[in-house]
Amino acid sequence: MGIIYLFDVDGTLTPARQPMDDSFRTFFLQLCGQAQVYLITGSDRPKLDEQVPPNVRASVEGIFTCAGCQFWKAEDLIFERTHEFDPKLVQALEGFVASSPFDGRFGNHMEFRTGMINVSVPGRNVSKEGRQRYYEWDKQQGERQAFIKTLNDQFPDYSVSAGGQISIDVSPLGWTKAQILKHLKNWHPKAKFIFFGDRMNEGGNDRPLALALEVDSPQHRSVSVDGPQNTLIALKDLFTPTSE
Ligand code: M1P
């Protein structure tokens, strides 16, 4: 039975919102040459393209963006799933950004993607330093976790999770990364899946897929990592490139 590798992107294959490192890319391309690999990101396609180089995008079996609402083969969009969001939910997200006591707003706070909304208090235009500052502040204050709980209580028809470092992803109930499992099982009914992600904690956007894999079969595995270096170490334990 074949092993199929699944990877989150931000915080797993690359630092958050940064491009893939060259040495990581070399190893990863060897993996893609010898095994089947899929990428699953909460981000949209333009952001993925900034972070993952074209030769990697061409070497993987497929790419799920927007938490699985879009599926791509290399540069071609194969299918997508769209949704019209409840205006009351949109209002609540706007209220969250407006009422946060965090002292920095940098623009582009609500990003409407295919089948999901990404909302962020500092905003997607924040600098790398500003991103780190909000991330540390939020870890102390628990702002995102508290708002995730409020939204989950008020809008039971939606799934809400902490995106990466600074944002929250909101999608219709069940339209999380877990939605990709039915496609993967259809295409590879006998495969053993190994999923790498950095947000498998409660409220993290890798958690639904990790749980779905656990429920589906004890043969699948989820590997929780805390950055690309950590992913590389875990991967080297599982996979040895064949010499040329
Ligand atoms: O791919 C992981 C997440 O990356 C970004 O999160 P943040 O900006 O909070 O670090 C967002 O694109 C988010 O939607 C995505 O899930």
Image: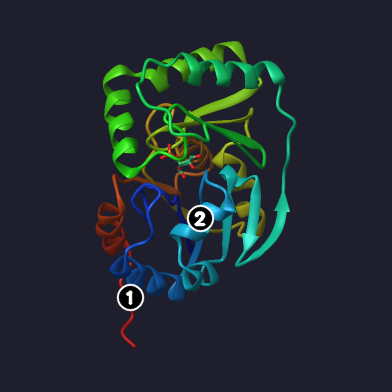
Q: Horizontally, is 190 left or right of 27 in the view? A: right
Nearest the eye: 193 or 64: 64
Residue holding disc 2: 48
* Mark 2, secondary structure of its residue: helix
* Mark 1, secondary structure of its residue: loop
* Above or below 185: residue 242: below
Residue at horizontal 44%, vertical 58%?
51
* Above or below 39: residue 139: above
The answer to whether residue 156 of the structure is visible from this angle is no
Q: How packed is label 2: few (under 14 Cα within 10 Å), some, or many (20 or more)?
A: many
Can you tell which mark lies on residue 65?
A: none
Q: Horizontally, is 186 left or right of 55 in the view? A: right
**Corner quadrant of residue 187:** bottom right
Nearest the eye: 213 or 150: 150
The answer to whether residue 40 of the structure is visible from this angle is yes
Q: Does label 1 point to a residue whose CB lies under 8 Å from ligand 1?
A: no
Q: Position of residue 41 (x, y in %)?
A: 51, 48
* Above or below 111: residue 192: below
Can you tell which mark lies on residue 241?
A: 1
Q: How packed is label 1: few (under 14 Cα within 10 Å), some, or many (20 or more)?
A: few
Q: Tell which tag, 1 or 2, sits nearer the viewer.
A: 2
Nearest the eye: 99 or 161: 99
The span from disc 1 to disc 2 (Cα, nearest Å) is 25 Å
